[in-house]
């Protein structure tokens, strides 16, 4: 049985999700999903998961004042026996998607996802599998195909100085950063460009039009 928490600040959204999932639990479907609670804020979601064994949280991203869904996802995933988190939201910007995945979400769905796909995603996420709605997957693939869109302005500055042959210390002095911060930027650059060295990072950046 998948013990599930609904975390959304809109009561009507929680009611709709509960109706769908309760129908599944009552025998119309596999009967393997049970809604064990609801949370109207990120803080409530964290508190619930802290005291109640939960397998999966359906998490919105925006809760109004207070913590965000991304914050809640990170906090929930840091618990001793963490549930999986499946983000279900209206927001599909690159920043929202990447922040949620980096916080530990197993998947990311939009609220217009068809019921059948949502149920399949719930079961997959509860098993720890990655689940993305088609629209979200398309956005991420576009980002992967065009890595320059993933680099922040600061990362691009660092990469340009690397291409000029500057050392980490020289880059730090130029941009008023510590060497540790420069190294951190380089790690992120390598990850986004799919490389493992300064030389390859510069080559990939030139090939893809970043530099």
Image (cartoon, rainbow, N blue to C red):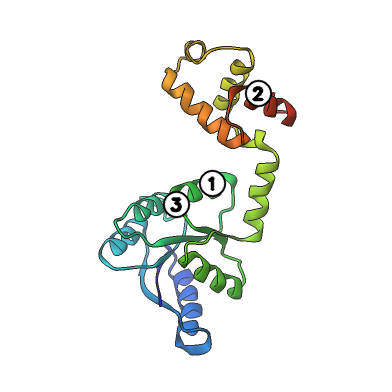
| Quadrant (top left/top right/bottom left/bottom right) for the N terminus | bottom left
150 above or below 173?
Answer: below
Viewer-nearest of labels 2 and 3? 2
- CA gap, disc 3 and disc 1: 10 Å
Image spot of residue 34 (x, y percent): 41, 78
Viewer-nearest of labels 3 and 1? 3
Identity of the residue furthest to the left in this view: 51
User: Residue at position x 35%, y 56% from top?
Assistant: 76
Residue linked to disc 1: 98
Say whether disc 3 or disc 1 marks the residue closer to the N-terminus: 1
Residue 163, located in which quarter of the rendered image? top right
User: Residue at position x 37%, y 54% from top?
Assistant: 77
Name the element at disc 2. Answer: helix
Residue 53, located in which quarter of the rendered image? bottom left
Image spot of residue 187 (x, y percent): 51, 30
Left or right of residue 67: residue 200: right
Query: Crowding at label 3, few (<14), some or many (≥20) Cα neighbours within 10 Å?
Result: some
Name the element at disc 1. Answer: helix
Left or right of residue 107: residue 160: right
Residue linked to disc 2: 202
């Amino acid at each position: 049985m998948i013990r599930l928490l609904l975390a959304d600040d809109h009561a009507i959204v929680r009611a709709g999700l509960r109706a769908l999932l309760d129908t599944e639990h009552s025998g119309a479907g596999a009967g393997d999903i049970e809604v064990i609670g609801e949370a109207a804020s990120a803080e409530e979601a964290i508190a619930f998961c802290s005291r109640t064994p939960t397998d999966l949280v359906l998490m919105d991203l925006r809760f109004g004042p207070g913590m965000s869904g991304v914050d809640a996802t990170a906090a929930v995933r840091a618990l001793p026996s963490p549930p999986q988190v499946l983000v279900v939201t209206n927001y599909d910007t690159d920043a929202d998607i990447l922040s949620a995945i980096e916080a530990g979400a197993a998947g990311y769905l939009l609220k217009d996802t068809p019921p059948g796909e949502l149920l399949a995603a719930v079961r997959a996420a509860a098993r720890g599998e990655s689940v993305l709605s088609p629209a979200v997957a398309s956005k991420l693939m576009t980002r992967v195909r065009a890595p320059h869109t993933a680099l922040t302005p600061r990362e691009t500055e660092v990469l340009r100085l690397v291409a000029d042959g500057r050392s980490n210390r020289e880059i730090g002095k130029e941009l008023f950063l510590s060497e540790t911060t420069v190294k951190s930027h380089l790690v992120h650059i390598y990850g986004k460009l799919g490389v493992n060295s300064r030389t390859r990072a510069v080559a990939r950046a030139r090939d893809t039009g970043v530099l």
